[in-house]
Image (tube, helix red, strand yellow):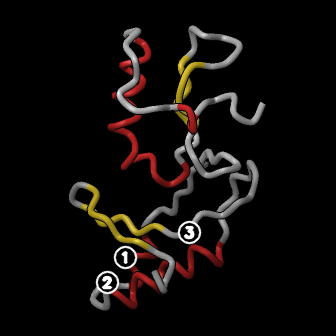
Amino acid sequence: MEARAAATPLGDRLRIGGTMEIAGFDPRLTPGRIEGIKRAARRYFPRLLRAELDGAAPWMGFRPVSPDGLPYLGRAPRHPNVVVATGHAMMGFSLGPISGQLVAELVAGEPPSVDLTLLAPGRFG
């Protein structure tokens, strides 16, 4: 956490990720953040060569975030035939399985196995 980076295996590679930047819809990468991630990687993986890091293609992705930090999950208020599941921020991989289960329950017309009141897509009007 001190370095604000995380490393996770991704197939036969190592994915090193950084922090979330609130930047609207600007798709440009921030060179200073990329450099900080590389420094953190070398600090915790000293045998990792700088050339390996420089040869890796940097990537960024938009993270949909709600004002309260909770995802939106449930039926759209004005279009009940639309099921919404978004706003997972940086927790999409870990919340994906339960979100998928809840979406399946809603689409199948079953009552959700978890109370979705706090996640209602229309909670902010």
**Residue closer to the observer: 58 or 101:** 101
Q: What is the x, y in percent for residue 80?
A: 60, 10
* Horizontal side of residue 7 vs 57, given as left or right: left
Residue hosting label 1? 52
Marks 1/2: CA–CA distance: 7 Å
Q: Amino acid at mark 2?
A: Leu
Q: Which residue lies at the image location 66% right of the left edge and 50% below the top edge?
A: 68
Q: Is residue 89 left or right of residue 123?
A: left
Q: Tag 1, which secondary structure?
A: helix
Residue 55: quarter of image = bottom left
Query: Which residue is tagged 2?
Result: 48
Please, what is the three-letter code of the amino acid marked with disc 3? Thr
Q: Under tag 2, what secondary structure?
A: loop
Left or right of residue 87, residue 102 in this image: left
The C terminus, quarter of image = top right
- Residue 79 in percent (x, y) is at 66, 11
Q: Within the image, what quadrant is residue 124 found in? A: top right
Query: Residue at 55% of width from left, 41% of height from top?
Result: 71
Disc number at residue 19? 3
Front residue of 118/57: it is 118
Compared with 5, 90 (above or below) is above
Q: Amino acid at mark 1?
A: Glu
